[in-house]
Amino acid sequence: MKNYMKSEFRRLRKKKVGYIVLLLGIALLVGAAFGLDFMSQREMEFPYATNVFYYSSIFVAPNFLLMLTGTLAIVLLGRDRDLISVSIGFGVKRSHIFWGKYFVTLINFLIIGAIFFGVAYASGEMIVPNTEVEHLHRFINNSLNLLPILLSALTVTYVTAILFNSEISAFILIFLIYRVINYASNAIIGILPQSEPVFDYLPGTLFSELPVNYLTGNVQLEYVHWGINLGIILVFLLLGSLLYRRKSY
């Protein structure tokens, strides 16, 4: 599997679309910081030119974060999945393909995520004019709470895309799991208030609470949500690996 992963890393290095997505993400983060700086210079009483607002704005767009994660998963997995049949023809095991592509996708996603985190932190501290040091700890903890959600969304996208060769199905599924079910739970809680403790553990619940927790200062590591999202990752990977063995090309 090591040789297969090496070939996958070489393939990704040649893909321009991955660099484009990375540069667009960096441009959005830096551009948002410069936008706040520009507005503070035009309006002396502009209240949002703070790193508190800048960092919180990263957490208030769950749909965008899901779309970005899904897009990165598709880009890293590659649209040239027809070549998988060629690899199988040359004797590469299906398990090596499934797990090799996943680990390559995961490693690259973590690298890109670390770059985005570093750019966001640097922009909030160096470009945004009004900074508050005590909010850095909140930003780090909230980012750590966001990480398992994005990792499980990445895994769901990867498994769905490699099994069904359908990007649309992958996006529909992650929005169903992380957003639609959460919206439906709010309606159910309105009818059955006693069901609220059950829905508190949905992946989408923490997603919705991240910006509120950050702004109110109620930020702590959510170990339960880490466990739940790791459970989602394991279930999808195990089921995906079993189904992939039977997939026809």
Image (cartoon, rainbow, N blue to C red):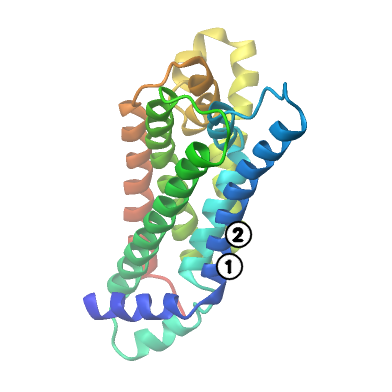
* Residue 32 in the image: above or below residue 97: above
Residue placed furthest toward the left: 2
- Amino acid carrying label 2: it is Leu
Task: Name the residue tied to disc 1.
Answer: 20
State how far apart marks 1 and 2 are (Cα): 6 Å
In the rendered image, residue 78, in percent from the top left (x then y), is placed at 50, 72
What kind of element bears circle 2? helix
- Amino acid carrying label 1: it is Ile
* Residue 178 in the image: above or below residue 76: above
Taking depth in this image into account, of 218 and 103 the one nearest to the observer is 218
The numbered disc on residue 216 is none
In the rendered image, residue 177, in percent from the top left (x then y), is placed at 53, 40
Using the rendered image of the protein, determine whether residue 54 is visible from the camera's viewpoint.
yes
C-beta proximity under 8 Å, tags 1 and 2: yes
Task: Name the residue tied to disc 2.
Answer: 24
Taking depth in this image into account, of 143 and 106 the one nearest to the observer is 143
* Residue 47 in the image: above or below residue 173: above
Residue located at (53% from left, 61% from top): 22
Residue located at (71% from left, 34% from top): 41
Residue placed furthest toward the bottom: 90
Taking depth in this image into account, of 128 and 54 the one nearest to the observer is 128
Q: Residues within 10 Å of mark 2 (few under 14, many from 20)?
A: few
* Residue 208 in the image: above or below residue 217: below
What kind of element bears circle 1? helix
Q: Is residue 159 left or right of residue 16?
A: left
In the rendered image, residue 28, in percent from the top left (x then y), is placed at 62, 51
Q: Is residue 57 left or right of residue 35?
A: left
Taking depth in this image into account, of 191 and 21 the one nearest to the observer is 21
In the rendered image, residue 35, in percent from the top left (x then y), is placed at 68, 42
Residue located at (69% from left, 31% from top): 40
Q: How many marks?
A: 2
Q: Quadrant of the N terminus?
A: bottom left
